[in-house]
Amino acid sequence: MEREQIAREVRRRQVQETLDFEREREQTLKEQVEIVITEVEGKNVDEAVFARMSPEDAEIVSAELDPPGIEPEEDPSFFFERDDLINLDDEPEVDPHAEELARLNAELEDCRRRQSAFQSYLDALGSG
């Protein structure tokens, strides 16, 4: 087997593995976007659906979807007693879900762009 052919096969395998990784990454990012959206909209969906269910069934499903949290041992407001040291009133209120969605969507865009570049390489490699 000639050297160029060996190099082509190794490059094809390397790029294909990276492309497969980026495809899996895209799927994971899509799932994370869905989770963030569900955190925002889930309660509204639950209320509408629970209204059409028996209270007993709604309670069972609700307990599964929103398990009770672990209560902190100390009062969490303890850390915020000195809010006079930092003036947070001048800061615009930021929706953490919107920030996370923006970050995930930017990562999705980058992921898709990378997939396109790797696919382009494989296409060019195959035609050479």
Image (spheres, rainbow, N blue to C red):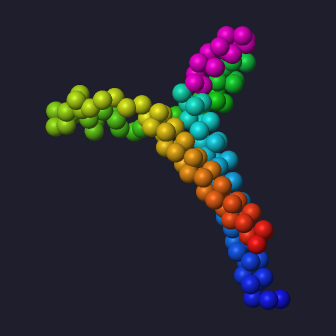
Specify start and end residues of the magenta stretch as a single range: 41-55
Residue placed most toward the observer, 92 or 77: 92
- Regarding residue 116, the answer to whether it shows in the image is yes
Residue drawn at x 61%, y 57% as measured from the top left: 114
Residue 74, percent across and down?
A: 35, 38
Front one among 85 and 13: 13
Residue 43 on the magenta segment: yes
Q: Which residue in the rendered view is the most extreme toward the left?
A: 85
Inspect this view and state whether residue 71 appears. Answer: no
Residue at the image position 63 percent from the left and 59 percent from the top: 117
Foreground residue, 110 or 97?
110
Q: Main secondary structure of the magenta part?
A: helix
Query: Picture coordinates of residue 32 (x, y %)?
Result: 60, 42
Residue 73 higher or lower than 45, as above or below: below
Between 11 and 52, the one nearer to me in the picture:
11
Image quadrant assignment for residue 92: top left
67 in the magenta segment: no
Residue at image position (77%, 77%) is 9
Extreme-front residue of the structure: 128
User: Splitting the image into 4 quarters, where does residue 126 fall?
Assistant: bottom right
Instruction: Identify which residue is drawn at 60% across, 30% down.
Output: 38
Residue 37, image x, y percentages: 58, 31
**Along the horizontal axis of the image, is 69 left or right of 77?**
right
Q: Above or below — where is 98 with respect to 19?
A: above
User: Considering the image in quadrants, where does the N terminus appear?
Assistant: bottom right
